[in-house]
Image (cartoon, rainbow, N blue to C red):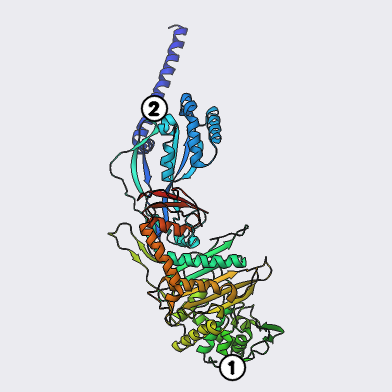
Amino acid sequence: MSVERQHIVRKASFLFALLLVLMIGVAARIIYIQIIDGAKYQDLSEQITEKIDTIYANKGNVYAADGSLLATSMFRYEIRMDVLTVDNKIIQKELPVLAKELSKLLGNPPSYYTKRINDAKRHKNRYLFIARNLSYPDYKKIKSFPIFKLGANRGGFIAIQKTVREHPLGKVAARTIGYADYRGRPGIEGAFANDLKGKNGQRLKQKIAKGQWKPINDNNEVEPEDGMDVITTIDINMQDIAHEALLEQLEKFQADHGSVVLMEVKTGEVKAIANLGRTADGKYYEKLNYAVGESHEPGSTFKLMSMIVALEDKVIDTSTVVDTGKGSWSLYKRKIKDSNRKGYGIISSARALEVSSNVGISKLIYDNYKDNPKKFVKGLRRMNLDQTLGLPIRGEGKPIIPHPDDKSWSGTSLAWMSYGYGVQLTPLQNLTFYNAIANDGKMVKPKFVKEIRYQNSSKGNIVFKTEVINKRICSKSTVEKAKEMLRNVVERGTATNIHSKEYSIAGKTGTCQAQYWTDSLYYIASFTGFFPVDKPEYSCTVVIHKPTRNGYYGNIVAAPAFKKIAQKIYTATPEIFTVDNASRAYSKLDNHFNKYDKQAQKSYQTMPNVKGMSGMDAVSLLENLGLSVQFSGTGAVRTQSIHAGEKIKKGKTVYLLLT
């Protein structure tokens, strides 16, 4: 064999051996993939062509006690446009009409939309933003516009649906109803988020042509479970009354913020809660839940707690006398002063509470507990004043009741805390105590939710019963004395300006100076009490911070709001309360109502003019006329979609803009 031929054979043998090794390697790899990694790649293949799609559960609703919808989930739509899919001839012909329709719906001039779409065409924009947060009716309307009605392939119409949480009655108790989003989880929405959200389902889908997915089976792999509905204790009418009463006083006194809580005495159900804070431009809105979360010195409303401890310990009686002198008393080189600079002289302990004498109350407590201040503090703690209420709503402020063992305790601490300084309570904690007096000594936990209700009626609902915090905070005789003193505060004490012969109110005014580290001294005005006195149905507290004009005392700033709330509830619920001479006092109101009712039933064949009416009143009127109402904003009606005088068609939707 020639040398050349031998060289060729060696090369061929080497190549053959190399190919054989490669073939063995490929075969080994195939066997490994099939046997060892087969399951792994099978799963990967299925993931590429199949996927588990989430079926989102419907979130539960939040309702008022009467069934009014407070929070619900609604569809909102974002509209975009793939300009490249639209033929140039269609753009040239239909764009002016589309721009005109968009202008009517969204507000910008037609030229704005013409320019945007033409610019998008030049820049090959396939995802041009048109509008967001459209309601379903507006989505249906925009979908029918020129070009868009051609659909996604020819008209470039892109609609992105999302679910948002809406409050149909606007900002009614917004901070108490709460949120479950980027703002945290305050209020009822946050407290019951797990109950409201439900459980998502799953469905297996397969990838088909053009990147689309279709269900593989008719049945879902896991069926979604809708969230449960939460039924609150809020009464819409009472909420409206409380909100308006608070707002009026805040605006009159140009105060920084304030809160109102109205509670049903026996059950502890919170029927209304309003929290309003001032903005930079002087308007008020539900800024924070001050009633639940803001601890502050209660001022003179705390004098009742001090009196009850002393009465229970039998160191004083309501007839015990105290010398208030000329309205000033020096203790450890510090002066305690009364608002009446002339003083009240020698008065009874009951009278000291009625006229809210700082000197009188502090002398009574100091003289009887200076040798054993722990006994006084123990009496306060016995009435649960040092404990939080354990609310489901997040952010409850912590009460502070100083103790002689504290490092900050001084010779003046006992006297100062007796009339509400150095002590801290939230408005709701303070009200809970007063509610216990109205409830014959039984302290009940404030309740915001009556029931959690499954949307599937076959399942049992969760009903919340009244929880008792303390079966008896003090003796029955002390309760009766406390009620009488609080009645006299209104009849002949510091709150005579809210006294009425038609209905009875008992309560206590509060005025104190406070200071945050960033602020100078300012006032907190309050009034806490209950009505009617003999058979209390409701307790209420009004707290207003930083009034800056027209006054700052509790009887002037806060008490009138309390009176307005009590008066309106009296007149709105005559089956509960009997009011002397009510027919004489409100006969004019009845005549107006009867005239209005007759007109509403017979004369409203055409659309009334509701511009300027409050949103709540307008909604009630129009729904009673058989119309479906949708609105945005809060406050009074600015515009209505059906013009006044147009013939009414039952079931037709009217859109209101509130400002």
Q: Residue at x 55, y 92 (%)?
A: 316
Residue type at numbered disc 2: Val
Residue type at numbered disc 1: Val
> Which residue is more in the foreground, 652 or 360?
652
Q: Report the residue marked by disc 1.
A: 321
- Residue 430 visible? The answer is yes
- Secondary structure type for disc 1: strand
Of badges 2 and 1, the one in the foreground is 1
Q: Report the residue marked by disc 2.
A: 26
Residues packed near mark 1 inside 10 Å, few (<14), some (14 to 19) or many (20 plus): some
> Which residue is more in the foreground, 311 or 284?
284
* Residue contact at pointers 2 and 1, CB within 8 angstroms: no
**Image height check: is 354 above or below 47?**
below
Residue 620 is situated, as x and y percent measured from the top left of the image, at 41, 59
Q: Residue at x 44, y 39 (%)?
A: 142
Separation of residues labelled 2 and 1 (CA atoms): 108 Å
Q: Residue at x 40, y 72 (%)?
A: 573
Residue 300 is situated, as x and y percent measured from the top left of the image, at 58, 79
- Residue 64 visible? The answer is no
Looking at the image, tell me whether mark 2 or mark 1 is earlier in sequence order.
2
Residue 497 is situated, as x and y percent measured from the top left of the image, at 56, 78
**Image height check: is 134 above or below 500?**
above
- Secondary structure type for disc 2: helix
Furthest toward the right, the residue is: 333
Q: Quadrant of residue 27?
A: top left
Where does the N terminus fall, quadrant-wise?
top left
Furthest toward the top, the residue is: 2
Position of 495 with respect to 157 (left or right) is right
Residues packed near mark 2 inside 10 Å, few (<14), some (14 to 19) or many (20 plus): few
**Image height check: is 437 above or below 656?**
below
